[in-house]
Amino acid sequence: MSIINRIFLAASSSLISENLMAHSAKTAYGKMVGIDALAKSGHSYKERLREFQSRVPIMEYDAFVPYIERMRKGERNVLWDEPTKWFAKSSGTSSQKSKFIPVTPTSLKLTHYGGFRRMLAWYIHTHPQSRIFCGKALTLGGSVQVDGLDGGRAKSGDLSAILLSNSPALVESLRTPSRKSALMGDFNKKLDAICRECSSQNVTNFAGVPSWNLMLINKLLEYNGCSNLLEIWPNMELFMHGGIGFDPYREIYKTLIPSGNMHYLENYNASEGYFAFQDNLDFDGMLLTVGNGVFYEFVPLPQLPDFLSGAKCRAATLEEVELGVDYALVISSVNGLFRYLIGDCVKFVSLLPHRIKVSGRTKLSINAFGEELMIGNAERALAEACRRCNCTVTDFTVAPLFMEASRSGSFFTKGRHRWVVEFGRAPQDLDAFARELDHQLTQQNSDYEAKRAGNATMEQLELIEVPKGSFERWMGSRGKLGGQNKVPRLYHNQDYIESLLNYLHQ
């Protein structure tokens, strides 16, 4: 193993560093699970790791809620020993309406801002002719609210809004729109303000969730009477995207930004931390960031129920992961969450350096008929179907339609998936597109292929096309426009689809 790789793996073991352990040892949670004793022990790394994994349980968000609520009310030294007033609000895989992830001063500086600095440093190093700093970076931020739980001191909001609220003066001088406009709570008013403020500026790069930025681009084109974004910002060269898969959007972005100098760079920047970025634009994978206040563990997805039931299983560390395995990601971090199951599944596409792909969510999948469809499968199949049928998709959601039984109890309708799709450029033959999408799903997922073989337990998917703007209007009606809110891609029942279709039929 090379010296560089040894340094990488040493940095990845930052949990055992005195800094991370010492901070947690002072907290109520750290004392309860015995991290305080571990911090004082003279054990070797491997001994301390085994002890840590045996003492500290892997937990989902719901189990941390009582501790986080104490933090939001102003109590000190609960999960972390720094005063914490910021909490990133997001929807996700929990029974709560929203998650509130602590953003400690250390996590803000070391994990979130540190990740962006590394990514930008890499981009400039590999693109020395870049002119991104000769213009502005556009950020489509969310909003923040005062919690009211700590005398007005605690605040929650989208991660993007928290990053904007705390960005240094130098960063603000290179960013647009104004902080006031970027933090507007009304998404449509925010878009109007951005059009007014930014259309005449030299914007060279932008960042965010592809679906929301697509709405912004369409608004800008309409406002300026242009056919593509280069007519407004001719020096545009970089879109840093994340939050959802980019493949279904790639072609429509290339159409709206027709430039050979345009780069699309994927980031893995969750509410819990900045974990990875695409360090090779020709390679499908993101470089895992280490030495950033985060210790990573990985649970093979089939073993996850055993872990959560309390079985004595050991999670893998970076030294032990294998290529091509779907892992549930577990982090221990300077945000105070130790052995926290964040809800994402990752797959390693290279080792040393460790590069990952986000392959899905621990709960964002459909397994109604044993098909085990992950979001990554669905997005890749959709992208390929769009390529073959010369169309683009702006939004979609999928849910299973279960087998129906006759009065005698015999099945007369087999199960299938129902796709509701909003096209940017519709296919010429919708039925042909549905068949192609179904075929591509069988190519991406062997379990789906097995269930579809001979219509064994699943029939061909059902496709419903909705008019342009449908998802945006529906999300707006639910108060879910912008920020960390995402269209629910895969869901285990028809609730979201019925809500959308009922809204459209009003």
Image (tube, rainbow, N blue to C red):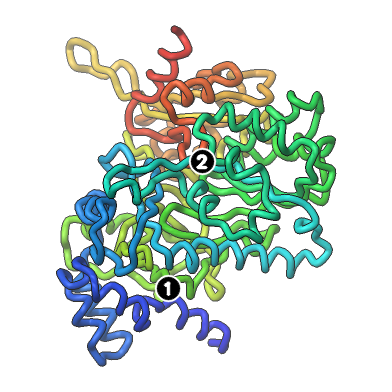
Expressed as whole percent of the image width and height from the top left, the position of residue 135 reads 78, 52
Query: Which residue is at a point 57% across and 84% down the rendered structure image?
Result: 4
Q: Up-down: is 228 above or below 6? A: above
Looking at the image, the residue that sits furthest to the top is 506
Kindly report which numbered mark, 1 or 2, lies closer to the viewer in this rendering.
Answer: 2
Query: Which residue is at a point 61% across and 65% down the rendered structure image?
Result: 117
- Residue 25, quarter of the rendered image: bottom left
Q: Between residues 406 and 89, which one lies in front from this camera angle? A: 89
Looking at the image, the residue that sits furthest to the front is 151
Expressed as whole percent of the image width and height from the top left, the position of residue 393 reads 61, 30
- Residue type at mark 1? Leu
Q: Quadrant of the C terminus?
A: top left
Q: Residues within 10 Å of mark 1 (few under 14, many from 20)?
A: some
Check disc 1 and report its element: helix, strand or loop.
loop
Expressed as whole percent of the image width and height from the top left, the position of residue 403 reads 30, 23
Query: Which residue is at a point 45% across and 35% down the rendered structure image?
Result: 489
- Residue 20, quarter of the rendered image: bottom left
Which residue is tagged 2? Answer: 142
Position of 230 with respect to 351 (left or right) is right
Position of 492 with respect to 41 (left or right) is right
Check disc 2 and report its element: helix, strand or loop.
loop
Query: Which residue is at a point 31% across and 75% down the rendered structure image?
Result: 23
- Residue 89, quarter of the rendered image: top left
Note whether residue 364 is visible: no
Q: Up-down: is 112 above or below 45? A: above
- Residue type at mark 2? Gly
Q: Up-down: is 376 above or below 82? A: above
Residue 318 shows which numbered tag? 1
| Mark pair 1, 2: CA separation | 34 Å
